[in-house]
Image (cartoon, helix red, strand yellow):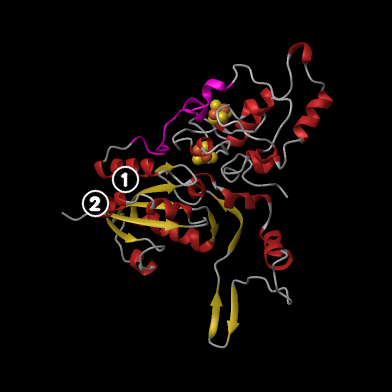
Amino acid sequence: MAKPKVAFYWCSSCGGCEEAVVDLNEDLLKVADAVDIVFWPVALDFKRKDVEALGSRELAVSFINGAIRTEEQEEMVKLLRAKSGLVVAFGACAHLGGIPGLGNFWTRDTIFQSSYREAPSVDNPDGVLPREKVEVDVGELTLPEFYDTVMTLNQAIPVDYYLPGCPPPPDLILNAVNAILTGNLPEKGAVLAPTKALCDTCPRKETKPEKLSITEIRRPWEIKIDPETCFLAQGLFCYGPATRSGCGETCIRDNMPCRGCFGPIDGVIDQGAKAISMMASILGLEGEEKMTEEDVQKLVAQIVDPAGTFYRFSLPASLLRRRRM
Ligand code: SF4
Ligand code: SF4
């Protein structure tokens, strides 16, 4: 019997999600044995025309990582959508916009100015910027359009399932592959990870005070972090209360607060707003020791880069989607 055909594709991403597939180690051989990988640009020499030659929905599943930043990426994911029975948004950037989505705090023009003219390492005396078409001796060269606004995958094409994380951990990837191969899948649109918040599975949860109150906001490099106590109880911003579990608490076990890469739990539309609301509820002191409005303002001012902190992984998926210029 023919094996199910599978594609892997990357859009605007760092390559970490491709590494995560390789990190399956010997389990990658089991996956490769069970499926026929027919497109994986980072590892195998298949071309776009090979995908174009496939029949409609001939691919059982396409795993697509990265956000959508360029015209070429949008074209490719539309092509893969047409050829795939299922599309899985693989990793935080496809799921929520991820780190490339922080580009939505700027415009294409400001990004080009910074990257090609102003950055200290740039050597560009003529101030040349990327152009979509340029004539050279041998003919016309083209580049895909660089969009002004980064999109999540589901803002470009319909997505069936989401594998969260930066990158998704091996056990969740294997569970997803097995579920797809056996047809044992949840409702369309589901995030293939537990529904609880990270605090529920955190090894430090017993040290999280019942009633939290932060009077000083610290950054990880400013203090010697206790390796067993809840980060919030140490005055460090931890995204755990507003983040889905399932990552194995990787950062926390390495003594770093959660930054939210697994995205929100079910039912939360805007992860950043949820985190802001959580922080607002624990800043300052209650009762007789209640802080003045001025003191609370000073406390809030200690949050360096609040927009980037609260929307580190989810700006394109948020209600605002981008900074309004
Ligand atoms: S806030 Fe962070 S450190 Fe504290 S219990 Fe939640 S996930 Fe763990
Ligand atoms: S602890 Fe938070 S930031 Fe780290 S992998 Fe888990 S969800 Fe992502």
Q: Which mark is residue 261?
A: none
- Quarter of the N terminus within the rendering: bottom left
Tell me the amino acid under the disc marked 1.
Val
Specify few, some or many for label 1: CA neighbours under 10 Å numbering under 14, 14-19, or 20 or more.
some
Rendered location of residue 106, percent (x, y) = 69, 53
Q: Does the magenta stretch mainly form a helix, a strand or a loop?
A: loop
In the picture, measured across the screen, residue 289 lies left or right of residue 323, that is: right
- Amino acid type at circle 2 is Ala
Q: Secondary structure at mark 1?
A: helix
Residue 177 image-quadrant placement: top left
Residue 213 visible within the image: yes
Question: Real-space Cα distance between discs 1 and 2?
Answer: 10 Å
Q: Position of residue 105 (x, y in %)?
A: 67, 49
Instruction: Give the x, y percent position of residue 30.
Output: 26, 50
- Classed neighbour count for the residue bearing mark 2: other residues with Cα under 10 Å, few (<14), some (14–19), many (≥20): some
Q: Which mark is residue 34?
A: 2
Report whether 286 appears left or right of 162.
Answer: right
The answer to whether residue 215 is above or below residue 223 is above
User: Which mark is on residue 177?
Assistant: 1
Marked residue nearer the N-terminal end (1 or 2): 2
